[in-house]
Image (cartoon, rainbow, N blue to C red):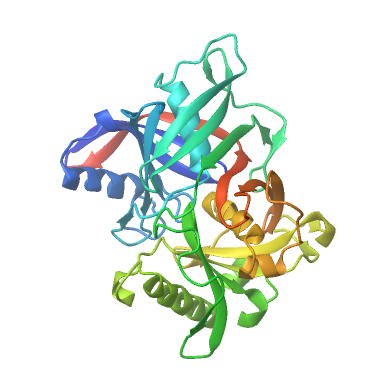
Amino acid sequence: MSQFSIPCTVYRGGTSRGIFFVKSSLPEDAQLQKKIFLHGIDAYNVNQINGLGSGTSHTSKVCVISQSLLDGVDVDYTFYQIGIGEEIIDDKGTCGNLMAAVGAFAVDEGLVIANPSTDYVNVSVFNTNIKKKLQLKVPVVNGRARVSGDYVMPGVSGTGAQFAVDILNPGGAKTGKTLPIDVLFSMETDRRAYEVSFVDVVNPFVYVAANDLGVKGTEPSSELTMNEGLLVEIEAIRSRMAIHAGMAKSPEEVAGSVPKIALVAEPQDYVTSAGKLIRKEEVDIVARMLSMGKFHRTFAGSGLYNLAAAALLQGTIPNRFAVEKDGVQGQIIRIGHPEGIAEVRVSLTEDGKDVVSIGLDRTARRIMKGDLYIPE
C-alpha cells in the first residue's frame, strides 16, 4: 500500500500535545481531512501505536490554524479531539492548554511577525469551536517563540517560557448563557439524586460534590479510573445533564468531549502524583475531572478556566466549596489538581453574575516539524 504525505508540526501546550496543520496545506475534501486526522493520531488503536497519539485524551488532539479574515484578529484556530480506539473527530469543544501552542505556532510559522528586538508579541486568535476571541502574550527570541525560561507549570517537568492566555467574554460558548439552567439543579440517576451545577465557560462543565459520590476528591486519578461503578455513575450524571441543558436530545447524541464533568471538594491536604504534599492553605478548591470517560492526569486547561469562574459565581457547587473571595475583579483562583496547583485569573461583571475575562499562564514548545504519512 502506498502513502501520501502532508506537512505538519507537533507542539506541546500546557499539559496537552497535538498535531498542528496550516489550513491551506490540508485538502478541501472533508472526508480526506478526516482520514488525515484519524490516521495521523491513529484513532483505530487504543494505544495509538500507528500514529502520533499516545493513548490519552490530552495527546489525542489536532489543531488547524489559518490567517484570519476578522478585523483585529491575527489567526483562526480550530480544535479537534480524536478518538482513542474509536473513529471519532469531535470539534464541539476546545483545548485550553493548546491555546498557548497556537500562539507559538503562529509566530514560528510567520503568520504573526515578531520584531527580533522584542521579548514578547501579542497574538489575537479567534477560536472557531467556541467562537471566542483570545489574547495571547507570546514570549519570543530572535523573532521566534521562546522555549526556555523559569516558569514552573505543574504537570510538566522542568521550566519554560511563560505564555499568557486570556479569553474574552468566555461564557455561553455552546448554550448561549454562562449559566443556562438553575445554578443548583437536582438531578436523578437510577441510583440517587444529586445536586449539580452546569456552567458554560470555554467548554461546558457539569460539577458534582466528590463526597456525594463517596470519594474525597483527592485520590490519584489512576485509583479513581479503576472504580468502574464510579465511572458509570459519573457518565450517567454527565449524559443526563447534557440532555437537560439542550446539548443533546438522547443519550446516543451526547458528545464524548462535552460537556465535561468534574468532582469538587473543599481545600484539604493531599499528595500529588509526583509525591509532593499540597497543604489546604495553598489552594482555594480541590477538583478531579474526566475527559473522554477517564479521569484526567492533571486538569484540562478549559476546565481550569471554567472551574475558576464557577468558584466565583454565587450559588454553584464549586462556589459552595471554594474559599470565599472579596470582590469580582482581578481575582486569582488556586485550583488543586492531581499534579499540583494552577492559578487562574478571573474577572466578573460588576454584578458578579457573568465573566468578563479569564486567563492562565502556560508553557509551550515545538517538538517536531516534517511530513506526516497517511496510507492511501
Q: Relative to residue 264, is residue 4 drawn left or right?
A: left
Location of residue 159 in the rendering, given as x and y in whole percent from the top left corner = 69, 34
Which of 191 and 220 lies nearest the eye of the viewer?
A: 191
- Residue 4 seen in render: yes
- From the viewer's perspective, is residue 36 above or below residue 288? above
Q: Residue furthest bottom?
A: 191
Give the image quarter of residue 217: bottom right
Q: Nearer the viewer, residue 190 or 346?
A: 346
- Is 244 displayed left or right of 228 in the figure? left
Q: Which of the pair 121/90 is nearer the observer?
A: 121
Residue drawn at x 39%, y 21% as measured from the top left: 111
Looking at the image, is 349 positioned above or below residue 192?
above
Q: Residue at x 52, y 51 (%)?
A: 302
**Residue beneath the point at 79% across and 66% down:** 268
| Location of residue 32 in the rendering, given as x and y in whole percent from the top left corner | 18, 43
Q: Where 129 falls versus 87 (above or below)?
A: above
- Quadrant where the N terminus sits is top left
Which residue occupies the extreme front position in the image?
351
How far from the left and from the top, in percent, is residue 234? 51, 76
* Number of numbered discs visible in the structure rendering: 0
Viewer-side residue, 21 vs 328? 328
Please state, as top left, top right, bottom left or bottom right, where the C terminus lies in the image: top left
> Quarter of the image holding residue 313?
bottom right
Q: Residue at x 32, y 62 (%)?
A: 86
Residue 218 visible in rendering: no
The percent position of residue 251, horizontal first and vertical second, equals: 33, 76
Q: Classify residue 16 as left or right of residue 343.
A: left
Check the image and name the residue furthest to the top.
Answer: 117
